[in-house]
Amino acid sequence: MKNETHKDCCGNMFPDCLHLKDNVPNEGKVFTVWMKTPKGSVLPVHSDRSIEINHDQWEECQQCADFDSCYKLSMAKIALESAVAS
């Protein structure tokens, strides 16, 4: 059942950290994670990990009436994903 009181993007500031893909942008509403692996590598080694912030989207999110709730839900999802991944 869809909650009609929140926007579809609510709780999605960060990408899904349980399913990060290599060499493509893993995008959330505000934050993007890159997991770069060397070409031809057969080992699960990431030579470069980086995070990008969409500052314009961050400013837009802060103006949203649901910002506090969305931020808390986004952080709760990150905490749960971290627990599951450990």
Image: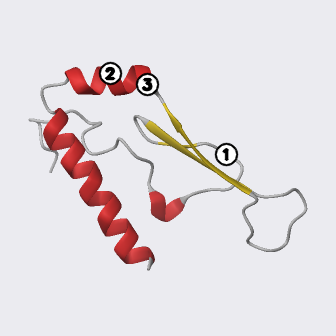
- Amino acid type, mark 2: Glu
Report, in whole angstroms, how far the alpha carbon at label 1 lies from the one at label 3.
20 Å
**Quadrant assignment, res 10:** top left
The relative height of residue 81 versus residue 25 in the rendered view (above or below) is below
The residue under the point 28% across, 53% down is 75
**What's under tag 3, amino acid-wise?**
His
Image x and y of residue 14, in percent? 40, 46
Label 1 sits on what residue type? Val
Residue 26 picture location, percent across and down: 55, 46
Residue 42, quarter of the rendered image: bottom right
Residue 23 position, x and y percent, is 72, 49
Mark number for residue 24? 1
Distance from the alpha carbon under mark 3 to that under mark 2? 6 Å
Residues 52 and 4: in front is 52
Q: CB of mark 3 within 8 Å of CB of mark 2? A: yes
Residue position for label 3? 55
Which residue is at a point 40% across and 35% down the rendered structure image? 29
The answer to whether marks 1 and 2 mark residues whose Cβ atoms lie closer than 8 Å is no
Q: Nearer the viewer, mark 1 or mark 2?
A: 2
Horizontal side, residue 34 vs residue 54: left or right = right
Q: Which residue is mark 2?
A: 59
